[in-house]
Each structure stands twice: as C-alpha cells, then as structure tokens.
Image (tube, rainbow, N blue to C red):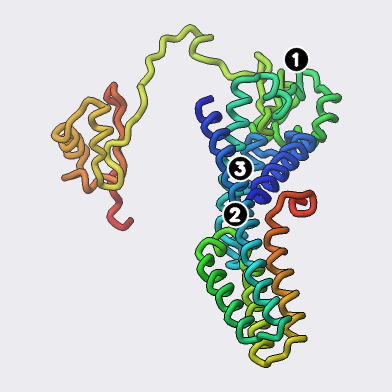
Amino acid sequence: MKKAIAAGVLLALLFAAAGWNIRRVNRFTDEMVAQVELSRDFCREGNLSAAASALNAAMDRWREAEPWTHIFIRHGELDAVSDAFFDVLIQLGARDADAAEGAYERLEENLRCIDDLEQLSLGTVF
Amino acid sequence: MAIVLLRTIIIYTTLLLCMRIMGKRQLGELELSELVVSVLAADLASLPLQDVGIPLINGLLAILTLFCLELILSGLVLRFHRLRGLLFGRPCFLVEKGVINQKEMHRNRFTVDELTEELRRQSVTDVATVDYAVLETDGTLNVILSPAAQPVTAGQLHCETAGDGYPYILISDGRILSDNLRKCARDESWLREECRRRGAPSPADVFLLTCTPEGKIFFAPKEVNA
C-alpha cells in the first residue's frame, strides 16, 4: 500500500507540475504576443525600422526560452512560430507594411495556438 | 503536459474496461492491468523514438503515469478485495465435479475445441477424467483430474520418502559458483576432490556440477569438441 500511496503522490505532483506548466505557457505566449503587438503598432504607424527592432527583441526572447519550450511543446508548433517570425522580418525588410500585417496576424495566431493546445478542454484532450 | 497525463489515464481506463469485458481469453497469462500496461507502454515508448518532433517528455510522462496508475490499482486491489473481483474477474469453473459448465463456457466464449486443446496441452486426452477445470483470472486453465485418474503418490502408498533438497549449481561451464558452494556448506578443496574422483583434473574441465545439501551430486564433464 505504501507504494500505491507514493504513486498517488507522484501522480498528484505530476498534475501540479502540469498545472504550473499550463500557466507558464500561458504567461509566456501572452508576453510574446504583447511584444509582437508592440512591433505591429510601430508597423501600423509606418515606423518599420522600430517595428523590426521590436520584433528582433521578441525573437531574442523566443530563442531564450527554447531550452524549455523544446522540452514541453511539440516541435512542429515551435517551428511554425519561428517561420512566422522570419516571415514578418522579411516583409519588414521589404518595407511592405500590408504584407507584414498579414504575417503579424499569422505569427500571433501561431503563438496563441501553442497556448490553446496546452489548455485543458474537451477539444484538446480528445 | 496535463493533456498527456489525462489522455494516458483515459486510454488506460478505457483499455482496462474493454479488456475486462472481452474476458479472460484475451489475457494469455498476464493479469489484466499488466497486459494493458505492456500493450500501452511499448507503443508510448516507441512514438517519441520514431518521431523526433515529439518531445521525449511526452512519452516519458505517459509511461510514468501508467506506472503510477498500475501501482495505485494494485495497492487498491490488495486493500479492497471486491475491487479485485470487479476489475480482474474471478476464477470460473469450466468443468465442475466432472460436468462441463456450458453456461460458464458460453460466458467466457470458450469453445469445446479450445477446452479440449487446453486439456491436451496438459496431457489430458479424456474429458471424462477431469474433475475440475478452472479458468484463472490470467486466462490460464488449471485442470484437476478425478481421483481415479490422478497418479499415485508415495503418500498414498504409505512409502517413506526423503527429499534430496535443492540441487545447487556449483560449477557452471568450468566456473565455480562460490555463493552456491557456501549454501551447500562445502568448500573448494572438497569440490576439486569431487572433480578429480570423477575424472576431471580441475573444475575448468567440468561443464555442470550440481549438489544438494544432502550430498547428491550430478556431474557432466566438458566435451572436448564442444
């Protein structure tokens, strides 16, 4: 019975860690979306160089978190976000604000998708 | 992470219930939960290995969850006897007092062919000699022959028999197993002497030598061409 209790405690700890992980993913993606949104605002104002530097800062933050994200998040989703970052940077480099707007939308959507897929819901579990 | 945990619990419970409903025939000498764990663990472990895009933690977490569930379940089953019957079923008599229990056969989807096959596997060719055939919870069939068909034992003949004790392996392929030598209360010089008496110059020339605590020895020398 001692083993069963220890296993129950371990399972409870795993659930607690999972809950903590959900909150961390949520906070991290919110932070990333906010940074991307800041860059997007610069882009809307026509300040493309400020938009690019804000986006580079966001990308640096994204890369900093890679040791953790690669352990807990499916690599396909991470690659999609990284691709979307580069897409926006390419459009900003080409000084095409309209195309950049679409790329920003995709980037934010990919970031939110990571959070959505970690949240517990009937859709994600089943 | 939480999704992996919940999915594992759901799949484990579903498989356990489905296998329980399918009956003992599916088990093949594993307890129900053991079979479910072995079916799942093999697959869960292989997925992150095959696809590097899946974080290894997903496989590890699922296996760890299975391990916890299995331990919790076996702990609960030890404590609550009724739960054991509910989850793993109870042994059932396919043959009782020499009569085939057709209802139990039908309930366990056991055909006559399968019954006779199982009996033959245990060297029983005549169903009439079977007193009891018990289908255990792990899917094995245990057969108890009628007294008339059972081999005579020394006890029934009122013969005095002395047990030889457990034969310990003292030399395995030329290697002396010192632990077993101690258990046999013998020493190496005795062993070398026994080898010499049987024509082997040293233990290295012996393929197998076993000895019971009472001193009954089995000796097999090494073949030259082996």
Chain of the residue on which disc 1 is drawn? B
The residue at the far bottom in this view is A94
> For mark 2, what is the residue?
A24
What label does residue A15 carry, if any? 3
* Same chain letter for marks 2 and 1: no
> For mark 1, what is the residue?
B97
Percent position of residue B194, x then y: 19, 34
Mark 2 is surrounded, within 10 Å at the Cα level, by few (under 14), some (14 to 19) or many (20 or more) other residues, namely few
Chain of the residue on which disc 2 is drawn? A
Looking at the picture, which amino acid does disc 3 mark? Phe
**Image position of A86 with respect to B202: above or below:** below
**Nearer-the-camera pick, A66 or B10:** A66
Residue A92 quadrant: bottom right
Looking at the picture, which amino acid does disc 1 mark? Lys
Looking at the picture, which amino acid does disc 2 mark? Arg
Mark 3 is surrounded, within 10 Å at the Cα level, by few (under 14), some (14 to 19) or many (20 or more) other residues, namely some
Image marks 3 and 2: residues in contact by CB distance under 8 Å: no
Mark 1 is surrounded, within 10 Å at the Cα level, by few (under 14), some (14 to 19) or many (20 or more) other residues, namely some
- Give the residue at x 29% y 30%: B211
Percent position of residue B36, x then y: 66, 42
**Image position of A9 with respect to B84: above or below:** below
Alpha carbon of mark 1 to alpha carbon of mark 3: how far? Answer: 52 Å
Alpha carbon of mark 2 to alpha carbon of mark 1: how far? Answer: 65 Å
* Same chain letter for marks 1 and 3: no
**Mark 2 or 1, which is nearer the eye?**
2
Chain of the residue on which disc 3 is drawn? A
Residue A78 quadrant: bottom right
What label does residue B221 carry, if any? none
